[in-house]
Image (spheres, coloured by chain):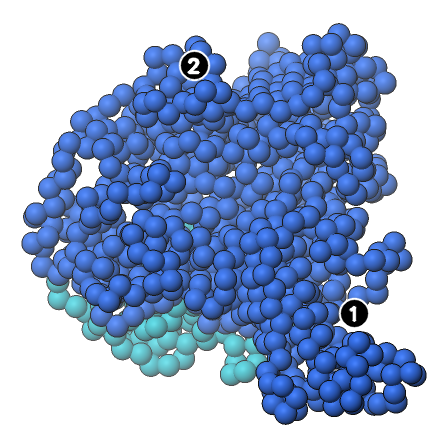
Chain colours: A cyan, B blue
């Protein structure tokens, strides 16, 4: 197979890569760009561990072909903190002990940020439905929901 | 090591009981933490495994010649490449790579290592396996019948009575008294048959490892596991190499819940690497996780309980039949031991049958075996309470096991927390809250043994007086925070001056797997003991400086101090000051502790849940959930709450949705998260928690493990709530909408 040359932006940085036509964005992020913060839990779009945004839209990167992101802005967990300043969501996940094993955490953070970018004042129900595509097996979601609500509150104050 | 004396006047803790941020937190919220699949090595090959499409088939031959010729393929492995295993590893070997027969859909039969995923896939397709398909059995009741297809011959032991098929491996029995006599004393006796489906642990991180074996016989393995010492010992045994040659490093682990307490891909990756002389990485797909790693048992159970009008339980009898997949070792023994453990019973008997079927070998799942047995017992108790018009919490408290109770499985309990959880439940506003139409409330109790086991830690004081704690148990839910807290507490220094790391297998002695809710208890105990050893050395150093007897020095608030006015007047020396002059007073300061920890302290919980049943669709919505559990002493309450909440929600999934569905062909029909549906955020309410603290006499701070008990009561608590809401007793899990609807329809008819 002939590889495809793709020019894109990842976490604000101009990025180029070569990929196979059938290669997913998830595989390119992890295997070619070294961005292993995005996780693979299922490879079928059911668990949300591989959540990233493309031009601000939340997607499962395991369901996106890498070649599709040419000319797009891709944002991953690695781009969420501002230098050594954590994003309020990251800080609230720590404060609320909203993670146990942490494998689903990057996906939840990316998904939650996509929610708060659209809706800075979500209800608990809105948070629960928005995050229904992200599976967590450790926490029972209680502390995750609290962390997201608290981060939203703090971001509204800022 | 006993609870520190004077615990009836509760010790005032400075660090234990607070909620500091976890030390690995930043790595986990920024994507920096390295899990199993996140490691690479130069020249690394991709490993892939070929799996049986048949539930049961004789393997007449495997032709790998074409696969070996695929460009990029560097090694092909089948069972023939492994040496004959030791008897104690024979089943593990056969599960890792099938020998004479494939015993379940998904059973590994061959593996390849290649330079690319494409080449590996092509090679798998080029392997020709000559199967002779055999009749199969996946249902536990069918498997027990004479004439059922047999997986193994001649493996039933002498405990199995005549009349059963050769798939029944072992029969267990526990109890005391005379149950028949007890039933005669009862005012009401109810007997029920109940079934539960196999549920998978459902960790979000698939199994992954990176192996590297050199021609010199030295081997390295990076792996996500609950126990890298177990991985080392097992893999070394299977490969026929010395354990010291194999250094295993545990990655961060993306969930386990018992499912990562054995080996699957690791010996295969090592064998491929040895053959190819290159590093080999294997990452399972989610489908492989479902088809080929251990869910828990599916079960069929009969439970009979007698009760007097005043709520006294006169006798309890349970027969538990658990299929554990293709090899002996279902957790039915634990189920039989645990099912009646919450109660003080004069007449009790539990019988367990360990049965093999053509399913993947079950693996431990959080309190293995206990939730199903508790589901049976707690369902029947609930029905008795309803029919006799009794308060289900009151009846449970009346019959509750207490200090001095001879347990149904033998030992006599010491200080235990079941009555405290029931009393807390009775006082809680949840118990009095009003219910609406089609809504019901259920309660249930649960028990788990807890475990201690082999533990080895090393605590090193650095020259600047900060401390590294080295332990050997993968941190599966925040345990590094708990260890750091206990080290800081004992040393009397701030939390942020201790760093806890999980060492590889070459750095410490044997450590048991992160299982049995053992880590906070056992590793915590060893940490405290190691700290006390380091403190003793610090006191000796201060004594040396002051020129007094070491016995005349005490350790308080992170400082060595003269024990009293007679010892002399010297200003206290901090750990920092003592560390700074360590070179001149005798050398580095460290504490170690090695122990097979005993006294884990049993654990009890009571759960309360409200549900609403939609009579049109049979769908169940969980409205409110409260967990009451004894933690002994909650080291980091946030992570204790997290264990309570996580266990409860796994139980909700098991009760309402999750099940392994097999077709008539014996193939798993739902090997993915779309069709094997674990609870999602929008399914659930907040999960309220109440932490009780009844100190464990076996730990210096009174700590009990908390990880597993929380999954024991939910199946029954939810079944009791659904039965109350639907007005009909449900006796089969999961209570998915079609089943609930059918039960409602049958009750109306």
Left or right of B572: which side holds B643? Answer: left
Q: Name the one closer to the observer, B234 or B21.
A: B234
Question: Looking at the image, which residue is at 35% across and 16% down?
Answer: B148
Q: Residue furthest top?
A: B184
Question: Looking at the image, which residue is at 65% across and 79% down?
Answer: B497
Taking the image as drawn, is residue B494 in sight?
no
Neighbours of disc 1 within 10 Å: few (<14), some (14-19), many (20+):
some
Please state the horizontal and vertical placement of residue B12, each as a whole percent of the image.
Answer: 84, 65
Kindly identify which numbered label has been placed on residue B164. 2
Left or right of B188: which side holds B451? Answer: left
Q: What is the number of callouts on the image? A: 2
Q: Quadrant of residue B44?
A: bottom left
The tag earlier along the polypeptide, 2 or 1, is 1
Q: Name the one closer to the observer, A141 or A111.
A: A141
Taking the image as drawn, is residue B530 in sight?
yes
Position above or below: B726 against A41: above
Position above or below: B142 against B111: above
Q: Secondary structure at mark 1?
A: loop
Please state the horizontal and vertical placement of residue B585, each as a whole percent of the image.
Answer: 66, 88
Label 1 is found on which chain of the structure?
Answer: B
Asked whether the residues under marks 2 and 1 belong to the same chain, the reply is yes
Q: Name the one closer to the observer, A31 or B630.
A: B630
Label 2 is found on which chain of the structure?
Answer: B
Q: Secondary structure at mark 2?
A: loop
Spatial CA distance of label 2 from label 1 is 59 Å
The quadrant of the rendering that contains the N terminus of chain B is bottom right
Q: Quadrant of residue B320?
A: top right
Question: Looking at the image, which residue is at 38% across and 71% down?
Answer: A35
Position above or below: A140 against B309: below
The residue where tag 1 is placed is: B14
């Amino acid at each position: 197979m002939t590889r495809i040359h793709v020019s894109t932006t990842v976490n604000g940085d101009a990025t180029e890569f070569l990929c196979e036509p059938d290669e997913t964005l998830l595989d390119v992020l992890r295997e070619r760009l070294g961005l292993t913060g995005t996780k693979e839990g299922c490879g079928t779009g059911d668990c949300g561990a591989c959540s990233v945004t493309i031009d601000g839209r939340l997607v499962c990167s395991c369901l996106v072909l890498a070649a599709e992101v040419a000319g797009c802005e891709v944002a991953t967990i690695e781009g969420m903190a501002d230098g050594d300043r954590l994003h309020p969501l990251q800080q609230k996940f720590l404060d609320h002990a909203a993670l146990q094993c942490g494998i689903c955490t990057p996906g939840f953070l990316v998904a939650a940020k996509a929610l708060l970018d659209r809706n800075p004042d979500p209800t608990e129900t809105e948070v629960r439905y928005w995050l229904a595509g992200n599976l967590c097996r450790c926490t029972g979601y209680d502390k995750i929901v609290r962390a997201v609500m608290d981060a939203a509150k703090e971001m509204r104050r800022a | 090591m006993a609870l520190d004396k004077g615990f009836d006047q509760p010790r005032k803790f400075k660090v234990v009981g607070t909620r500091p941020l976890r030390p690995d937190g930043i790595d986990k919220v920024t994507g920096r933490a390295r899990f199993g699949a996140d490691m690479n090595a130069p020249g690394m090959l991709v490993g892939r495994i070929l799996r049986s499409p048949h539930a049961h088939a004789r393997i007449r031959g495997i032709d790998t010649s074409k696969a070996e010729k695929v460009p990029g393929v560097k090694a092909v492995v089948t069972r023939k490449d492994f040496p004959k295993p030791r008897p104690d590893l024979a089943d593990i070997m056969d599960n890792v790579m099938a020998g004479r027969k494939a015993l379940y859909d998904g059973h590994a039969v061959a593996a390849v290592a290649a330079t690319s995923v494409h080449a590996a896939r092509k090679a798998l397709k080029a392997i020709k396996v000559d199967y002779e398909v055999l009749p199969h059995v996946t249902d536990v009741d069918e498997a027990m019948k004479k004439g059922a297809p047999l997986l193994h011959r001649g493996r039933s032991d002498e405990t199995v009575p005549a009349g059963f098929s050769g798939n029944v491996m072992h029969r267990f029995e526990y109890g005391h008294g005379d149950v028949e006599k007890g039933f005669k004393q009862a005012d009401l006796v109810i007997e029920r048959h109940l079934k539960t489906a196999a549920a998978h642990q459902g960790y979000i991180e698939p199994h992954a490892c990176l192996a590297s074996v050199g021609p010199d016989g030295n081997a390295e393995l990076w792996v996500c596991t609950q126990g890298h010492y177990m991985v080392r010992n097992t893999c070394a045994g299977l490969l026929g190499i010395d354990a010291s040659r194999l250094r295993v490093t545990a990655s961060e682990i993306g969930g386990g819940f018992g499912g990562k307490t054995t080996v699957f891909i690791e010996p295969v990756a090592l064998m491929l690497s040895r053959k190819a002389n290159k590093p080999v990485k294997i990452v399972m797909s989610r489908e492989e996780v479902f088809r080929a790693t251990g869910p828990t048992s599916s079960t069929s159970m009969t439970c009979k309980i007698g009760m007097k009008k005043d709520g006294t339980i006169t006798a309890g009898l349970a027969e538990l039949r658990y299929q554990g997949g293709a090899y002996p070792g279902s957790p039915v023994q634990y189920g039989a031991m645990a099912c009646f453990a919450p109660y003080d019973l004069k007449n009790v008997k539990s019988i367990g049958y360990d049965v093999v079927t053509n399913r993947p070998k079950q693996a431990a799942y959080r309190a293995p075996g206990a939730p199903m047995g508790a589901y049976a017992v707690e369902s029947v108790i609930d029905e008795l309470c309803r029919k006799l018009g009794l308060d289900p919490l009151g009846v449970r408290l009346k019959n509750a096991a207490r200090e001095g109770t001879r347990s149904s499985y033998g030992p006599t309990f010491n200080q235990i927390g079941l009555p405290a959880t029931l009393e807390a439940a009775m006082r809680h506003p949840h118990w009095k809250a009003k219910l609406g139409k089609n809504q019901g409330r259920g309660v249930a109790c649960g028990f788990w043994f807890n475990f201690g086991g082999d533990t080895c830690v090393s605590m090193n004081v650095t020259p600047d007086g900060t401390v590294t704690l080295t332990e050997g148990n993968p941190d599966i839910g925040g345990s590094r925070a708990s260890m750091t807290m206990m080290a800081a507490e004992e040393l009397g220094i701030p939390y942020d001056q201790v760093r806890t790391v999980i060492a590889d297998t070459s750095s410490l002695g044997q450590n048991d797997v992160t299982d049995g809710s053992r880590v906070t208890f056992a590793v915590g105990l060893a940490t405290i003991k190691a700290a006390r050893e380091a403190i003793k050395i610090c006191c000796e150093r201060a004594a040396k400086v002051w020129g007094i007897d070491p016995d005349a020095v005490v350790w308080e608030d992170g400082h060595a101090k003269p024990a009293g006015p007679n010892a002399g007047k010297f200003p206290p020396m901090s750990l920092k000051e003592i560390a700074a002059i360590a070179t001149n007073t005798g050398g580095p300061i460290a504490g170690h502790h090695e122990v097979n920890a005993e006294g884990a302290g049993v654990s009890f919980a009571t759960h309360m849940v409200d549900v609403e049943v939609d009579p049109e669709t049979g769908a169940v919505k969980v409205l409110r959930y409260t967990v009451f559990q004894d933690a002994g002493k909650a080291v980091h309450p946030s992570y204790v709450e997290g264990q309570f909440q996580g266990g409860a929600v796994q139980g909700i999934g098991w009760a309402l949705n999750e099940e392994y569905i097999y077709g008539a062909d014996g193939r798993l029909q739902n090997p993915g998260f779309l069709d094997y549906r674990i609870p999602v955020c929008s399914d659930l309410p907040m999960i309220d928690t109440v932490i009780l603290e009844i100190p464990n006499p076996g730990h210096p701070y009174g700590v009990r493990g908390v990880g597993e008990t929380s999954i024991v009561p939910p199946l029954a608590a939810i079944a009791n709530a659904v039965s109350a809401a639907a007005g009909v007793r449900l006796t089969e899990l999961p209570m998915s909408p079609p089943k609930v609807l059918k039960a409602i329809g049958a009750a109306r008819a």
